[in-house]
Amino acid sequence: MPPTATITPVRENMVGHLDLRIITGIASVAFSGAFDNPDDWVRVSGSFLVGAPNKDKPIAYATIVVPSSFDVVDLKSGIPGWAVDASYSEYDDATQLIRVYVQLAVKNTNSEVLGVAFQVSLEYPYSPVTIIEETQPLGAA
């Protein structure tokens, strides 16, 4: 049976204005090692939606995901390990939210990932800043 992970965002914050937005938060995860291969790394991919609905599509994404909550079931059954092998995000047309994709790994049956922290930085193609051309140098009278 392939490993599965259930990922649910439990808290998020969004800051920024117009051309740059940053979404941070914590997602609850239920993922542990597999019993059919107890001494090796087990990997699983999952995704979750974050942000507020927005019809404008970002032009650039930067995504960071790290394990934020993990558990050691039994130290006698081997050295535990947790990892985020990869993460990225993209605009979800159906929901107008940002979908965060993550590939998690745990080592042997005594490791569990219970949560991940995430930060998604989004850049939009417009800016709230208006450049005003100076007609005389600063400090000139």
Image (cartoon, rainbow, N blue to C red):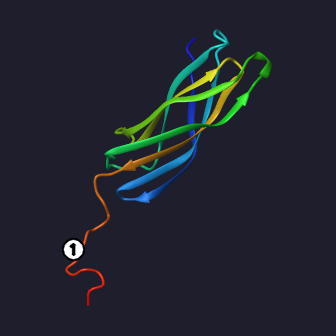
Residue 49 lies, in percent from the top left, at 47, 39
Quarter of the image for the C terminus: give it: bottom left
Q: Which residue is at the front of the view, 6 or 83?
A: 83
Q: Which residue is mark 1?
A: 133
Instruction: Name the residue: 53% across, 42% down.
Output: 118
Instruction: Name the residue: 46% across, 52% down.
Output: 22
Quarter of the image for the N terminus: give it: top right
Instruction: Name the residue: 36% across, 38% down.
Output: 94
* Other residues around mark 1 within 10 Å, as few (<14) / some (14–19) / many (≥20): few
Can residue 83 be seen here? The reply is: yes
- Is 53 situated above or below 139? above
Can residue 96 be seen here? The reply is: no
Relative side of 76 to 25, left or right: right
User: Residue placed farthest to the bottom in the image?
Assistant: 141
Q: Residue flagged by tag 1: what amino acid is it?
A: Glu
The quarter of the picture where residue 136 lies is bottom left
User: Residue placed farthest to the left in the image?
Assistant: 135
